[in-house]
Structure formats: structure tokens, C-alpha cells
Image (cartoon, helix red, strand yellow):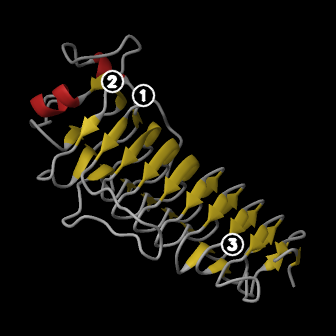
């Protein structure tokens, strides 16, 4: 279904002289380039910036979306794209205020952050921030990755990866109106912070790994929700509006701490049906 091939990564850059590039061959993107267009041959002036060929791309400045911008700030329509935000950010116009369950966002919602087509496999987005956008990062292809990213106060979910074999690492999703992180089957969510997202913390498909995350103060339906065949380990889950862990049969979990979820420690912290692989703590004691 998905492959680990990287042979095409960067080849297009050798065939495209004349486009602005960094010293390491990455194509540079900034506000001026976005408004001018021609970041790639099919890229029209304004947003979205269209990345239509494999290779490395890097922000060299912040991208500022206007109230009339639609779609996403950056659209990816190729396999083997590495988008490095370079420590910069994408700023939208829909910055939400308040905290769950009273998080409110401007209407109409802002454009999204980064989006890829279903045919775009092995896309990587890393090293920067998104704030006040619609859907933060939405990657549809297999083998996609999001890492070292902060997504805050957006009017939709922070990170959604629907393809198989996705990975999300070191992502900070805070005060977004939707889910913090949603991934498909055979995915990994590791070392992330999901804080005060109105639609819940982490949601996965089958056969996922959810490990070493901090999931606190998120809204319903659950802090962590995983499908059959998954493993949940080493997470800190506290003060969420719904269950600490909602799981299907065949899910293994161990080494997690659940506290004050689902209305308080007098309520159920973990939905029954999974298999404990090691000690879990519920409300200051071992989980039943």
C-alpha cells in the first residue's frame, strides 16, 4: 500500500533552474513568493501556494493569510515532498478564544494550513507553527509524517492524517476547535502535547501506537480513542471532559496515568474491553 522509496526526493530540483532555492537545494517560500506565484510552474499568484513536484521546500518567512483566502495556505500535489517551515509560521484570521467547552471562533473560518491530495504519498511537514487557521495540517496520502509542529487556536482540528502508515511526533496542539490529532490505520502518535482541544485529544484507526503523550483538558468525546489492534503506553491523561481512554477489543494498554477525566475521579476513566499490558493508574490507584 505504501512504500519507503525516497529515490525521487529532490530530483525535480535538479531540473528546475531559475526557481529560488536555498543553499541545500530547497525551494524557498515566503509571503512575497506566495503572492507573486511561480513557486512551482503551476503555482498561481496568491494562496494557496501549490507544490506540484517532489523535492524540498522551506519557509524563509511567515505566511499571513487574509480574510478572503480560501482552501489551504499550501497545497501539496506530489509524492515525496518535504516541507520544512524553517521555524516560521502560518497565521490565519480565525484565532479562537476561550477554553472548552466554551471555545469560540470567528465566522467565517480562516483558510487551512497545509493540505495534500490523496495521491500525494510520503509527505513530511515539520519545524514550525500554525495559528488561527482552519484545519491545520491535512495529509491524505500513505506514509505521511508531521513532526516538531505547534498548532494553536484554529477553528478546526489540528492534525489529520488519513493515509496508512502515518506518523505524528513532537506536535503541540492547543485550543483548537476540533480534534487534536486524528490518524488512520498502522499509524504512530508519539511525544505530543494535546491540550484543551474542544473535539478531544487523539483518535486513531486500527493497529496504531499511541505512546508518551500528554493529553489534558480536552473536550468530548474522549481524550484518547483507539481502534482494534492498537497499543497505548506511557501517556499522561488528565482533566479531560470525556473518557481518558476509549478503546475497542484487542487493544493493549500499559504504563498510563488517568486522572480526573470524564467528570472527575468518581467516574469511569477507561472504557472496558482492552487488555492491560502493565500497570495503569486510575485516580491515584491501579486501574481495575
* Precedes in sequence: disc 3 or disc 2: 2
Return the mark for residue 99: none
Numbered label attached to residue 60? 2
What residue is at 32 percent from the left and 41 percent from the top?
A: 90
Mark 3 Cα within 10 Å, few/some/many (few <14, many 20+)? some
With 130 as the anchor, is 106 left or right in this view? left
Please say whether residue 240 is visible from this viewpoint.
Answer: yes
Question: Distance from label 1 to label 2 (Cα)?
Answer: 7 Å
First in sequence: mark 1 vs mark 2: 2
Q: Mark 3 — residue? A: 229
- Identify the element where label 3 is drawn: loop
The percent coordinates of residue 72 (x first, y second) are 24, 51
Q: Residues within 10 Å of mark 1 (few under 14, many from 20)?
A: some
Q: Are marks 1 and 2 in contact (CB under 8 Å)?
A: yes
In this image, 267 relative to 115: left or right?
Answer: right
Q: How many marks?
A: 3
Q: Residue 5 at what x, y percent from top left? A: 50, 37
Give the class, few, some or many, for how many residues have Cα within 10 Å of label 2's Cα (few <14, many ≥20): some
Tell me whether the residue at label 3 lies in contact with that at label 1, contact meaning CB atoms closer than 8 angstroms. Answer: no
Give the Cα separation between the discs numbered 3 and 2.
41 Å
Q: Which of pointers 3 and 1 indicates the residue nearer the eye?
A: 1
Q: Which quarter of the figure has residue 254?
A: bottom right
Using residue 114 as the reference point, say whether residue 125 is left or right of it: right
- Residue 86, label in figure: 1
Residue 159 x %, y %? 45, 57
Quadrant of the snapshot with the C terminus: bottom right
Taking the spot 56% from the left edge, 67% from the top edge, the residue there is 201
- Place residue 188 in its image quadrant: bottom right
Q: Is residue 115 above or below residue 282?
A: above
Which residue is nearer to you in this view: 4 or 89?
A: 89
Mark 3–mark 1 Cα distance, whole angstroms, equals 36 Å
Amino acid at each position: 500500500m505504501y512504500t519507503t522509496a525516497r529515490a525521487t526526493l529532490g530530483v525535480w530540483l535538479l531540473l528546475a533552474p531559475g526557481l529560488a532555492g536555498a543553499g541545500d537545494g530547497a525551494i524557498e517560500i515566503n509571503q512575497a513568493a506566495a503572492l507573486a506565484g511561480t513557486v512551482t510552474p503551476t503555482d498561481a499568484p496568491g494562496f494557496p501556494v501549490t507544490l506540484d513536484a517532489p523535492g524540498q521546500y522551506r519557509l524563509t518567512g511567515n505566511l499571513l493569510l487574509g480574510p478572503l483566502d480560501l482552501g489551504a495556505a499550501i497545497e501539496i500535489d506530489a509524492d515525496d515532498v518535504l516541507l520544512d517551515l524553517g521555524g516560521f509560521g502560518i497565521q490565519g484570521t480565525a484565532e479562537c478564544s476561550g477554553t472548552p467547552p466554551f471555545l469560540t471562533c470567528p465566522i467565517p473560518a480562516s483558510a487551512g494550513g497545509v493540505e495534500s491530495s490523496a495521491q500525494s504519498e510520503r509527505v513530511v511537514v515539520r519545524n514550525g507553527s500554525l495559528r488561527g487557521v482552519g484545519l491545520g495540517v491535512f495529509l491524505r496520502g500513505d506514509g505521511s509524517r508531521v513532526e516538531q509542529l505547534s498548532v494553536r487556536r484554529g477553528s478546526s482540528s489540528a492534525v489529520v492524517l488519513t493515509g496508512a502508515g502515518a506518523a505524528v511526533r513532537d506536535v503541540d496542539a492547543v485550543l483548537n476547535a476540533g480534534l487534536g490529532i486524528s490518524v488512520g490505520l498502522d499509524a504512530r502518535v508519539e511525544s505530543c502535547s494535546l491540550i484543551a482541544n474542544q473535539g478531544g485529544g487523539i483518535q486513531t484507526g486500527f493497529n496504531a501506537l499511541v505512546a508518551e503523550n500528554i493529553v489534558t483538558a480536552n473536550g468530548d468525546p474522549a481524550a484518547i480513542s483507539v481502534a482494534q489492534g492498537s497499543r497505548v503506553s506511557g501517556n499522561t491523561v488528565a482533566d479531560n471532559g470525556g473518557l481518558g481512554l476509549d478503546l475497542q477489543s484487542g487493544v493493549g494498554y500499559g504504563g498510563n496515568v488517568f486522572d480526573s477525566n470524564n467528570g472527575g475521579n468518581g467516574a469511569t476513566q477507561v472504557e472496558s474491553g482492552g487488555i492491560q499490558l502493565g500497570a495503569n493508574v486510575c485516580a491515584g490507584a491501579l486501574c481495575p
